[in-house]
Image (cartoon, rainbow, N blue to C red):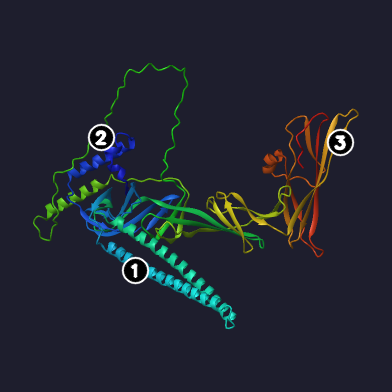
């Protein structure tokens, strides 16, 4: 299989400014020389309109592939891929050939006749006529509804006038008048609903008509430009040849999304890793092979170069007496001749008993050799590093930009450790957290997630990026069965020393813990104590009824900032009710008697 990139043909654009372009220009000049030496004649043209069959979807654009399968005899061919979308990026064109040898791939924009009168135009025109007829019907319906409303108003006015004339007479029937008013109220409500629905239907029909008219305007107006990719190749033996065209398109993207489902019994987390796909490239993707990628094809492959900088004594510039403009002329690399002298041996073949068979066979061998030489140097391959997800199923995504397609990337099972986290100094509730490890081979990208616990929807959250093998945590909301209530037991300031040398503030705390669930839990309790920013102020933790946590992550950072963390076991509720316990501790703040401090937080 061979690849070719159209940058190889853009010698005048790149040869003078890019070393790679210069190398590629040399390759093309060599190929052109080979073609000049052994003329292949005019190519056989095959025009195809193939749908997209494979997509590599990035976050913002996509690389699409379409493939033409052809049965070809030995010869020189050009395969024209027609009907390419406007969102195509021409510089990204690549071609791959199996069963033959690739020469090059070129992008063309060809002015074509107006599409007015084409089958596509006639279909749109028929659709527009149908919508216009619908709008006329809706307008007639509205006129009838409005006539009924006016007729009802006239009847009501006449009835009101009659009832006014009979109000002082014995024959006036109040009950009949009441029923008539009720009928009018119901009729008015029905008319209002009909008018409102009619207005919505007319608006929707007008929007649909505008969309069809926009498509017709884009097709009309004289000429339009057809976008083509022309793949040149040679076939050395009779073969089934597969020609694939790849290119980037804009207006396509995907984002990761998750559903995280946790069950406390038996203790498991299932992470449903999905991708939401949307595209408006101008052509549908129908049952395509889909690969999702985190690569950014628009980003340069090489890192930027750090250039040196300097500083010097400032010297004022001399006064300007004129301005001289310099013009640089850049010569393009010489091109191969456009017309090549015919040196081929012709296209006829031999037959049994032909006296010229030997010469014709020799001519055919020379031609085959020329075909092979013409295509042997035209292969380009490129690769990069990125996280990719090859989906195991075909995907269909319409090209409307409004509707999205969600597809599963993977379902990942985790074995979590469930922990209850309490911060009673800032929040009353105790939160359930699952600590898990990404034991899969997938990189979990940052994205939105929906949280479920024991089958119940908890709410949305944000998933951070988690590499394969890394640990992560997920919160499942407040567990009402576990409570932690914080109380400041005392807060006293005393002066010690015979001559009043030291002032000391002593604050004592208690957190009452309760577990009403049938299962024991592990509680992670967080609190805080003030941190001194002056050597004249000493702060220490005292009388803690349980030891602080000892994990390295906490000890290296949070503990040094005055954050307190305890990991406490809570028994399950028993026959007598919830299991209860308490944590107590104190903070002593000492300083000189004359040292004034900022307020000491509790």
In the displayed image of the protein, which residue is found farthest to the bottom?
A: 171
**At 17% across and 47% down in the image, what residue appears?**
39
- Residue 320 at x, y percent in the picture: 35, 18
> Residue at horizontal 41%, vertical 65%?
202
Identify which residue, 240 or 311, lies in the foreground.
311
Mark 1 and 2 residues: CB-CB less than 8 Å, in contact?
no
Residue 438 appearing in the image: no
- Marks 1/2: CA distance? 61 Å
Gap in angstroms between the C-alphas marked 2 and 3? 90 Å
Question: Where is mark 3, residue-wise?
Answer: 494
Name the disc covering residue 158, or none.
Answer: none
Q: Which mark is residue 133?
A: 1
Mark toward the viewer: 2 or 3: 3
Q: Residues within 10 Å of mark 2 (few under 14, many from 20)?
A: few
Closer-to-camera residue (202/142):
142
Q: In the rendered view, does 21 fall on the left or right side of 489?
A: left
Name the residue beneath numbered marker 2. 332
Helix, strand or loop at disc 2?
A: loop
Q: Is residue 400 left or right of residue 371?
A: right
């Amino acid at each position: 299989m061979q690849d070719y990139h159209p940058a190889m043909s853009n010698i005048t654009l790149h040869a003078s400014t890019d070393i790679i372009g210069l190398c590629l220009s040399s390759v093309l000049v060599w190929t052109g020389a080979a073609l000049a030496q052994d003329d292949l004649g005019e190519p056989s043209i095959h025009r195809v309109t193939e749908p997209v069959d494979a997509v590599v979807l990035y976050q913002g654009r996509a690389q699409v592939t379409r493939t033409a399968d052809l049965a070809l005899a030995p010869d020189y061919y050009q395969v024209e891929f027609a009907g390419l979308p406007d969102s195509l990026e021409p510089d990204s064109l690549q071609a791959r050939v199996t069963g033959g040898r690739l020469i090059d791939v070129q992008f063309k924009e060809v002015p074509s006749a107006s599409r007015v009168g084409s089958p596509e135009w006639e279909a749109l025109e028929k659709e527009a006529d149908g919508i216009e007829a619908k709008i006329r019907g809706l307008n007639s319906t509205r006129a009838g509804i409005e006539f009924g409303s006016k007729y009802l108003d006239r009847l009501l006015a006449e009835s009101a006038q009659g009832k006014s004339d009979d109000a002082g007479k014995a024959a006036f029937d109040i009950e009949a008048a009441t029923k008539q008013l009720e009928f009018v109220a119901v009729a008015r409500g029905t008319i209002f609903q009909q008018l409102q629905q009619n207005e919505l239907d007319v608006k929707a029909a007008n929007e649909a008509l505008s969309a069809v008219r926009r498509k017709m305007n884009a097709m009309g107006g004289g000429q339009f430009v057809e976008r083509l990719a022309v793949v040149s190749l040679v076939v050395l033996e009779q073969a089934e040849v597969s020609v694939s065209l790849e290119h980037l398109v804009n207006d396509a993207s995907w984002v990761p999304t998750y559903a995280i489902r946790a069950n406390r019994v038996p203790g498991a987390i299932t992470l449903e890793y999905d991708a939401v796909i949307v595209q408006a490239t101008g052509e549908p993707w129908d049952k395509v092979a889909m690969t999702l990628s985190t690569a950014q094809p628009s980003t340069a492959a090489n890192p930027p170069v750090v250039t040196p900088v300097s500083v010097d004594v400032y010297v004022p510039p001399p006064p300007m007496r004129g301005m001289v403009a310099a013009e640089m002329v850049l010569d393009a690399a010489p091109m191969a001749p456009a017309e090549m002298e015919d040196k081929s041996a012709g296209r006829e073949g031999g037959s049994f008993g032909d006296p010229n068979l030997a010469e014709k066979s020799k001519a055919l061998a020379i031609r085959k050799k020329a075909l092979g030489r013409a295509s042997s140097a035209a292969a380009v391959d490129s690769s990069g590093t990125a996280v990719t997800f090859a989906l195991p199923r075909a995907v269909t995504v319409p090209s409307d930009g409004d509707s999205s397609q969600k597809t599963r990337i993977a379902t990942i099972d985790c074995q979590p450790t469930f922990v209850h986290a309490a911060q009673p100094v800032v929040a009353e509730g105790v939160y359930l957290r699952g600590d898990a490890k990404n034991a899969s081979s997938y990189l979990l990208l940052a994205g939105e997630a929906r949280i479920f616990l024991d089958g119940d929807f908890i709410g949305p959250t944000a998933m951070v990026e988690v590499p394969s093998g890394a640990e992560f945590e997920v919160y499942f909301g407040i567990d009402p069965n576990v409570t932690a209530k914080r109380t400041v037991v005392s807060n006293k300031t005393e002066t010690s020393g015979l001559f009043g040398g030291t002032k000391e503030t002593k604050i004592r705390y208690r957190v009452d813990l309760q577990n009403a669930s049938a299962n024991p839990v592990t509680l992670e309790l967080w609190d805080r104590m003030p941190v001194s920013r002056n050597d004249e102020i000493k702060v220490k933790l005292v009388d803690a009824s349980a030891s602080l946590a000892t994990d390295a992550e906490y000890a290296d950072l949070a503990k040094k900032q005055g954050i307190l963390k305890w990991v406490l076991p809570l028994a399950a509720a028993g026959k007598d009710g919830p299991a209860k316990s308490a944590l107590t501790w104190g903070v002593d703040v000492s300083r000189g008697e004359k040292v004034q401090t900022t307020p000491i937080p509790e």
